[in-house]
Structure formats: C-alpha cells, structure tokens
Amino acid sequence: MSTNRTRKSSHEKDVSNGSNAKSTAINDNNNNTDEEDGIEEVDLTHDDSKTHRRNSITLHHHKKHHHSDTKARKKIRESRRFIFILGIIFGLVATVFFSTNKASFSTELDQLVNLNFDNLNSLFEDWKGWKDVLPSGIQSYLRDTGDGDDSLHGSAESFSVGLRLRAARNYTAKYNVVMVPGVISTGLESWSTTTSGDCPSIGYFRKRLWGSFFMLRTMILDKTCWLKHIMLDTETGLDPPNVKVRAAQGFEAADFFVAGYWIWNKILQNLAVIGYSPDNMLSASYDWRLTYFDLERRDGYFSKLQKQIEMTKKISGEKSILVGHSMGSQVIFYFLKWVEAKGEYFGNGGPNWVNENIEAVVDISGSSLGTPKTIPALISGEMKDTVQLNALAVYGLEQFFSRRERVDMLRTFGGVASMFPKGGDLIWGNLTHAPDDPTNTFETNDTSKEIDGPKSGSFGTFIKYKGKDGEEREVTIDESLEQLLDDSPSWFSNRVRENYSHGVAKTAKELEANNQIQSKWVNPLEAALPNAPDLKYYCFYGVGNPTERAYKYVPADKSVKLDYVIDSDSSDGVMLGDGDGTVSLLTHTMCHEWQKGSKSRYNPGNVSVKIVEIKHEPDRFDLRGGAKTAEHVDILGSAELNELVLTVASGNGDSIKDRYVSNLKQIAERLDI
C-alpha cells in the first residue's frame, strides 16, 4: 500500500509541479487510522491509464487557470483587508458600547454625528479634567499660559450668568428688550417663486441663502445662481428682477449663524432665566445689505420698529432698551434720529419720542465711526484673514470665490458702506501721525503676540501704494475713501455719496440743521444724540485684540482682474493696532465725547453715558474664547458682557461703573472735536 502511494506521488511530481501540493498531502498521510483513505488511493492509481489520464487533466487544469489563481489570491487579500478594517470598526463600536451605559450611548453617538463647535469645546473641557496627570513642569506651563481664575467673571456656560444673577441679586425682567444684530449676522431667505430662467427661485423658497449650511452648499454647488440671488441690483440697490430675498424673522434670525456657531443665543438664554420671553423681548432683524434709507423704503423697517416699541410700552407700561451689536449700533443711532424727524419716510414722532419710549441704548462693540477694514474689503475683496493664508489656500479660495467676485458682490451691498471710517484726519490721522500711533510696540494680554509699531511712519498713512516702477504713494483714510469712490462704477459711488456722510459738524447750528438730512444720521460726528435727558447710553467694547489698521498695496496680476492687492509678501502688508479683532479702538471715540455731557455739542440733552472696556483674555482651551473673551463676535458669549446686559435690562444699570483699560479716554481728551 505504501509502495503504491509513493510511486503515485513521485509520478505526479515528475508530470506537473502544479500538483505538488496534492501529492505531498497524500505522501504525508501515514496515519494508520486513515486506512480507508489509503485503500481508495490504491484503487485510484492502480490502473496506469487512469493515472495518465488524471495527470493530463491536472496539467491541463493548471495551465488553464494560471491567471485566475492570481486573481483569486488578490481577492483573498482584499477580502482579508476588508475583514480587518471591519474588525477595527466593530472593535471601536464595541468598546464605546461596553464602556458606556445605554442611556449615554445614544447621546454620545448623536454628539459624534452632529459635531459642532460646542461639541469641540466639550473635548477641551474633558482635557481640563485629566490634564492633572501630566508632569508638574507641564502643568506649571499650562497654568502660566492659561486664563487665570475663572471666578472673576463667572462661567460662560449656557444660562449660568442668568442663574447666578437671579440667585445672588434677585434680578428679574423690567424693561422691554429690543436686540439689533450686526452686519452679516441676520439670516437671509428667499421668498421668490419664479420657475423660469437659468436660475429659477422656487427651489430656494424659504431656504436661507445667508446664515445656514444651505448657504454653504449652494455656494459650492451652484455659485452662479447663489450670487444672482444674494447680490442686489446695481442701479436700484434693491432686489434684482424675479428675485425676492428678505431678512429672516424672530429670534432664529440671529441666534445662530450656522448650527453650532452661536451669535445672540447666549444672551437670549440668560435673559430668559430672569423672565424674558417673546412677550417682552424682540429681535429686530433686518436686511443688512440695504442702505438704511432703503430699509425703510422697501421693508418699512423703522416704522415697524417704532410701532412695536410703542405697543410693548402700552401693554407693559415700561420703556424699551435697544441693544445693538456692531453695525446694529449704527442702525439704532440712525433710528433715534429718524423717529423724531419730519417727512414722508420718517417717523414723525416728535422731539420727545425717544425720551418717552427709550430707557437706554446698549452699544456692544459698535462701529459708530466705522472701521478701517471696510475699505480694503471694497478695494480688493481682502482682509487680514485672507492675506495670511498659505499659498495653497489662497489659490483655492481664488479659484472658488475670487477677489474680483468678492468686490463685485460687496459693492452691491449698500449697507456695508455705512461702516466706512468717519471723521477723516481728525479721528484717523494724517501722513505724519495718528491719535493711536503706538510709541514702540503694542502688546496684548497674550504675551505670545506682539504687534510691531510703525518705525518710520504712522497709522495715519492708511495705505502705501507701491507702483510697478517701485515708487511708493501714501494716502490717508480720507484720501483712500475718495479714491475708492472715484475709481468705482458710478452706481456705487453715487449710492454711497447719496446715503452717507463722513465729515465733522463744527457747530451746534450745523448739527441742528442735520436733524432733517438722513445721510448725516449714520455719522455721530454730524448728528447729535437726541435731546432726551432721561436716556441712558452704555458703551461696552473689547480691547487688547490685534485689529487691522493700515495696509500696503502692490500692483495685481492680470489674472486677478484688479488694479491693486494687499502685499502678502510683506511682513507689514497689514498693520495692526488696538481693538477687538474687527473694529478699531478709535471707532469708540464718540462714547468718550458723549460722556462729556452737555459740555459737548454732541450731547445737548446731557444723556448719561457709561463706558466699560473689556480686556480680551481668551481661554486657550475654548474655540470661542470662553468667559473672558472680548473678540468682536465672541464677546456676545462673554460672561461679563452678559452680566452687564442683564444688569441694564433688570433696571440696575445705575450700579455699573465706568472702566477704562486702553488709553482711548486720554486720546479722546486730546482730540479737538
């Protein structure tokens, strides 16, 4: 039996290497308990003809399937890789499942799927909890670079400020609250139902074309149609034909920009804790793209606001406080002048309307005198954040949404031009010096950031243009604004000049005359506060955060389709000064001028003005800055800012004390306004 088995194995090996595995298996099968298999083998191989036929079949089979074997082995490897990956995923899921209870598992999974800024913040909170296991040296470093004692301003967690003030100081709702959002903060939605043309609107009906993830999706997948809907008509300054885009309404209009990125939500939460609801609180959202005059002409915005304030007073018996952020503070100032003015498109409320209906104005990071970064945005569609991107990111942004496209879009937004700097050389400086010129270096509280001061120049030199021949030309803010208007299409320059003024009224008589000129009402240097002795005015703004102040421009490549762009290769292509990261410190100069009371021609009614400067002290482990941030938008979630707003709303504003962190008070005193 073993002889036959050996002979068969040897014969198969000689005939074909392809049968080697099978012959070896037979040869190695020497187990005595496998006798039945051995007898079968003898019977199979005893006949030589059968053996030859089988070997021929084996050889033919090997040749026929040589390539298919390779494919089979590849499939096996791929299937093993798939099973390996599947095993990893299964292991991770199992780990999560068995390390959490069933109640928390669903929550954790939902948080993972619905990842947003708040979820990421929770990761940093977890980090705070277990960083104590690190070596003492690293712990010491983290303490030194951290934000110090959180108890100073309290927690910025949801509802925490309201809960603390209600428990500790018994704060409750008193005055009606009207919130006026800033530029780009209000969501915009489509109300057009057109079905014809290249970009039918019906598919966008009631979808947010600004302030949502739908906006981002549409920008990426259908940019041409998105721009057609979001841009305004160049001639009328209103909606283009067959397009109807309006500001979203209600608290949802500005509580979040996109899911997870809050704007007014923190303030809403804390106001609700002390008793506020839609009964005594209003979000006065508006289409920030429009000029202020067109806000009334198209939407009746100021008329509606006037009637709502009057109605809430009639129902509750209390006045209202107007809380404005950024450009919202300018809208409020315009409203205070509009409501008492006489005319077809004005409020006709009479000279005492503000005193009788408005308890206080809360100006949060307001842009009363404009902000320098508006000018480069409309010259070349740029700002510090785009200039400081790496080359690959700049290329990607340029291909997706070029600087030329950004300029064309922004110039149709008449409301954006309201934020042009006002006051000219008096406020922003001349070619030799500016009021806010740093003496050497300006340091923020963040010691890792140091802003180089001008060594042989001034912030007053707002833009340095470098020509193709290398020759430099310097211009002030006033000159750069005039050049922008002169070089722009007539529809843009005409709209700006018709709706806005940027000068300074030198006499009380001039201010009195301006009470009937609506183009002056956006500029507090050409329009005084209302003659309302019972009105209170609060200025709360951030300082100590590097903010755009001056620029260097160089000729642009032909592919950019612009004359000049910011010099991204220069270390001081964008020069930074003090502010909140968006609005320059000098824009708050009027708060200090108003604080002089009736001694200033800009405050004839001796309105009480209080100023609180908030130092920017961000939490390094919080994406939005935490309880002590003073960044332009994130300040709306600051614990101190929320406490200040609730203090005014609850009728305790008299307890607020002035606080000065920067040197703006001294600067304002030196200015010959």
Image (cartoon, grey):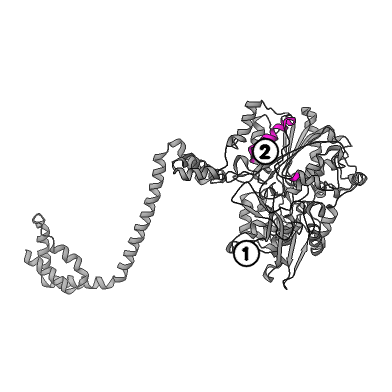
Position in image of residue 522 (x %, y %): 82, 48
**Quarter residue 665 falls in:** top right
- Is residue 200 visible in the rendered image? The answer is no
**Quarter residue 342 falls in:** top right
**Left or right: where does residue 632 sit relative to residue 93?**
right
Taking depth in this image into account, of 581 and 79 the one nearest to the observer is: 581
Amino acid carrying mark 2 in the image: Leu
Q: Looking at the figure, which quarter contains the N terminus?
A: bottom left
**Left or right: where does residue 507 sit relative to residue 205?**
right
Position in image of residue 418 (x %, y %): 78, 51
Disc marking residue 61:
none
Taking depth in this image into account, of 329 and 22 the one nearest to the observer is: 329
Instruction: Name the residue that disc number 2 marks.
Output: 641
Disc number lying in front (1 or 2): 2
Total count of labels: 2
**Left or right: where does residue 459 sit relative to residue 99?**
right
Q: Residue 109, relative to residue 270: is it above or below?
A: below
Instruction: Name the residue that disc number 1 marks.
Output: 399
Residue at figure coordinates x 71%, y 62% from the top left: 552
- The extreme front residue here reads 440
Quick check: is 442 in the magenta stretch? Answer: no
Taking depth in this image into account, of 663 and 201 the one nearest to the observer is: 663
Position in image of residue 204 (x %, y %): 66, 52
How far, Cα to Cα, is label 1 from label 2? 40 Å
- Magenta stretch bounds: 637-664
- Is residue 629 visible in the rendered image? The answer is yes
Disc 1 secondary structure class: helix
Position in image of residue 382 (x %, y %): 69, 59
Quick one: label 1 or label 2, which is nearer the N terminus?
1
Q: Residues within 10 Å of mark 2 (few under 14, many from 20)?
A: many
Amino acid carrying mark 1 in the image: Gln
Disc 2 secondary structure class: helix
